[in-house]
Amino acid sequence: MTDTLAALIESIDARVLAKHPEITITKNQWLQLRNALPVWRPIETAPRDGTEILGYDPAEDAVLEIQFDDEDGWRITWNHQRNPDCTHWMPILPPEEP
């Protein structure tokens, strides 16, 4: 990460914490929470073990549930369409417990 980007993120974090005094966590706790949130990652870093993930296809401006198959490559899980043009991915979060 560049120094400029790191400084921008730190500035945003400081403003969020300053604007919301009801947030009573330490800076380290805030960073842990922020870093635990899913983010879009380049598709080249996605798991290729059959794990179902979310893929972003900018040509369709769509978020798709996809998985990698050794024979077919990337495919949409619900209709088995092959090779969606996804450029980014993120994990599918487990449902929250009631």
Image (cartoon, rainbow, N blue to C red):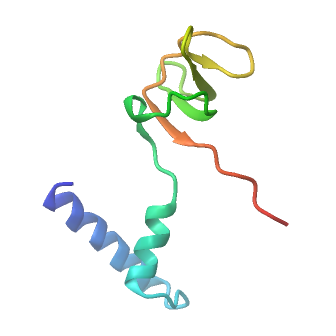
User: Looking at the rendering, in which quadrant would you find the N terminus?
Assistant: bottom left
Above-or-below relation of 25 to 92: below
The total number of labels drawn is 0
Q: Report the front residue among 42 and 57.
A: 42
> Which x, y percent locates residue 5?
22, 58
The spot of residue 21 in percent (x, y) is: 49, 91
* Along the viewing direction, whichever of 55 and 50 lies nearer the viewer: 50
What residue occupies the far right of the structure in this picture?
A: 98
Q: Nearer the viewer, residue 11 or 98?
A: 98
Q: Going 16% across and 55% down the picture, which residue do you hit?
A: 2
22 or 85: which is nearer to us?
85
Residue at the image position 75 percent from the left and 54 percent from the top: 95
* Residue found farthest to the left: 3
Q: Residue at x 74, y 21 (%)?
A: 78
Quarter residue 70 falls in? top right
* Image coordinates for residue 57, horizontal then vertical, percent: 51, 24
- Res 55 → quadrant: top right
The residue under the point 38% across, 29% down is 44
Q: Is residue 42 left or right of residue 50?
A: left
Image quadrant where one finds the C terminus: bottom right
How far from the left and from the top, in percent, is residue 66?
A: 61, 26
